[in-house]
Amino acid sequence: MKKLQNYVTGQWIEGNGEGVPMHDAVTGEIVALSDTEGLDFAEILQYGRTKGGEVLRKMTFQERGNMLKSLALYLTKRKAAFYELSYRTGATKVDSWIDIEGGFGNLFANASLRKLFPNQSYHVEGEPIDLSRGGRFMAHHILVPKRGVAIHINSFNFPVWGMLEKCAVNWMAGMPAVVKPATNTSFLTEAVVREIIASGILPEGALQLIAGSARTILDGVGSQDVVTFTGSATTGRLLKSHQRIIDESVPFTMEADSLNASVLGEDAVPGTPEFDLFIKEVRTEMTVKAGQKCTAIRRIIVPQNLVEDVQIALGKALDKVTIGDPRLKEVRMGALVSKEQVAEVRERVQELSKTAKIVYGDLNHVKTIGADASKGAFISPILLREDDPFKNLAVHETEAFGPVSTIMPYKSLDEAITLAQLGKGSLVSSITTNNDAIAKDYVINAASHHGRILVINRESAKESTGHGSPLPSLVHGGPGRAGGGEEMGGMRGVKHYMQRTAIQGSPSTLTEITGIYQPNSKYKDAPQHPFKYHWEDIQPGMSLKTHKRTFTDTDIINFANVTWDHFYAHTDITSLEGSIFEKRTAHGYFIISAAAGLFVYPNKGPVSANYGLEDCRFLRPLYHNDTVYARLTCKQKVDRDVASAEHPSGIVKWFVEVFDAEDELVAVATILTMVQKKQETFVE
Ligand code: NDP
């Protein structure tokens, strides 16, 4: 029987034990043996920290992002083989799409984040903080990659997505990963890792795979490492309280049981689009991945007078769910991951049915097509009804990790919110209503207990990504029972793998450290006009002081006529009494336009376009006869990929300060220009 290999310390290695069989969820056949015996976990972690970490930490966000993009493209071309293996985990084509292409989607989405980070290996966060009266002492926050390894202990239900949603983020941050998938579906994770390693796209050591059990992996964990865990609350709590995690203060992100609730608004009665949308959503969430989704709807909270309608409509909808061989097109629900999992789900349903009634499905019988129900890990969808959910609390505490959900009634929205909260924290909740006042009430009062809330109505339904889909740009995680962790969320997620440090010093020092010109920093006067330099030769702090200009009455009137901005302060000096203006006042836009007139270098050169303005402020009114001059200083450079073959360029942000004749600052703005590069640096 084929043994799965582990990819550790730069090689594919077989364990030296007997191996644990992994079964095909549909036929019960053995797919392969998992064997991790003899692996030296401490050595594996150290290899990641040094070999992979050293290279990743030095790469810029742009380089890391492009690496993720190349990897996503590479894997997408090879996806067919992954689908074949995925069927053996019991997943249908749709389930597999969520796992496989959802995982690649995470690589793409995280790759795009490179545009939001600076063109360097570390991040500068937030605004500068002035700590002095004289402007010579200030602070900023930076985030650098942690010097450890990210250890991901994953669950069986998403062998590909589970790995990539986490790795995409730690690679973006500049950290290597050791992935430990759940044993019973690790054959699919292994297939993907094999392709990743073969691609040569990642630096060696950036990814290691332990394809099976790793009970002592945390014994070697250190203070610069990050551990994430997805699985059962029992294991999660055990690992979170590991002595090394405590002793070394290792960040531990846990995502465990979650009894996600979906609420039907009182307005969404039968006959409304919202009622139908609700039924569809619940059915989908019960049956996609055969309900083995941490975000599945486990509690269906409906107005008391609609319980019967919901029960009947859901029953009819579930009747249409064909169960069987996940390869077949007509099959809507495949198998659970294993027979053990079927037994586990049955046990949980029995606990629930001590007070709740099974109103749909049969625990001991399931009709399948194209597969032998006795050989595979099949189970029928089970719908329960709990009529007294304030008294019988099992429904808020017992997670049956399969196609199982319970309907319960509420009398008022406050009751619905309280019921949702009885789950003691979940990954996601949803409400279906076409009444935005109800939506607002629910969201604001329920949000404390949920990591994500989806509002479904006729306007959003067509484009909604659904209750069950965590998205790379949104946070995924939840308080309390859901584990208290937070993953993904765009830039937020990347920061979980970085150390935030407050840096104090002079503005000039902080300009050097951050790569961003800080207010009050020394100017670096350039020998030539800054617009004459190419991208490569421009540095933050490079500055130009312009000549002066005096605003005349006619200038202001002309500007009003050209722009049609006839606000009284510019055009009617008889109305100024009682206003904040003393004389005819220059338009703020005129001040900025005049500044551009002073600092722009008119000849054709490397600056190819001005494409916007940020953080523009007018600090005091300027009147006719006032004289101004400007300072143009390079604030920051933002690299970008070049799509066309002509004129590769980057973005330069210029800090513009406008001063009056007494050197008082009167206006500031940041202008954005596209500046040509000398070299053609294309990215495919
Ligand atoms: P487990 O908690 O048993 O396993 C999760 C991961 O932890 C697996 O990779 C497992 O490895 C690993 N693991 C278990 N014990 C240890 C240990 N002592 N040291 C290191 N790693 C360990 O969960 P399962 O995936 O088996 O699922 C069991 C139940 O958990 C489900 O029935 C469901 O109720 C719940 N669950 C909830 C999820 C949620 O997010 N809501 C997600 C997944 C599961 P190995 O497989 O090698 O044992």
Image (spheres, rainbow, N blue to C red):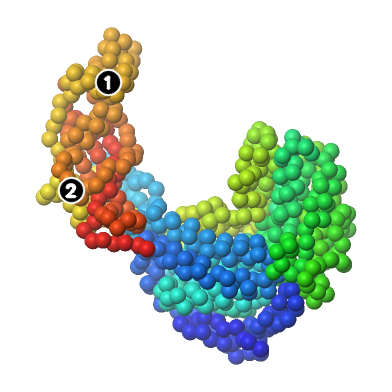
Q: Quadrant of residue 186?
A: bottom right
Residue 509, numbered label: none
* In the displayed structure image, the side of residue 555 where residue 485 appears, left or right: right
Residue 222 visible in the snapshot = no
Mark 2: secondary structure: loop
Which residue is located at x 83 percent, y 75 percent?
374
Mark 1: secondary structure: helix
Residue 242 locus on image (x, y percent): 60, 71
* In the displayed structure image, the side of residue 610 where residue 385 appears, left or right: right
Q: Assess mark 1: CB under 8 A from ligand 1?
A: no
Q: Quadrant of the C terminus?
A: bottom left
Going by the numbered disc 2, the residue's amino acid type is: Gly
User: What residue would you read off at disc 2?
Assistant: 605
Asked whether 302 or 268 is in front, the reply is 268
Which residue is located at x 87 percent, y 62 percent?
362
Asked whether 266 or 576 is in front, the reply is 266
Which residue is located at x 59 percent, y 87 percent?
15
* In the displayed structure image, the side of residue 595 where residue 220 appears, left or right: right
Residue 595 visible in the snapshot = yes
Residue 478 locus on image (x, y percent): 62, 54
Neighbourhood count class around disc 1 (C-alpha, 10 Å): few under 14, some 14–19, many 20 upward: some
How many marks on residues?
Answer: 2
Residue 560, numbered label: 1
Q: Quadrant of residue 61?
A: bottom left
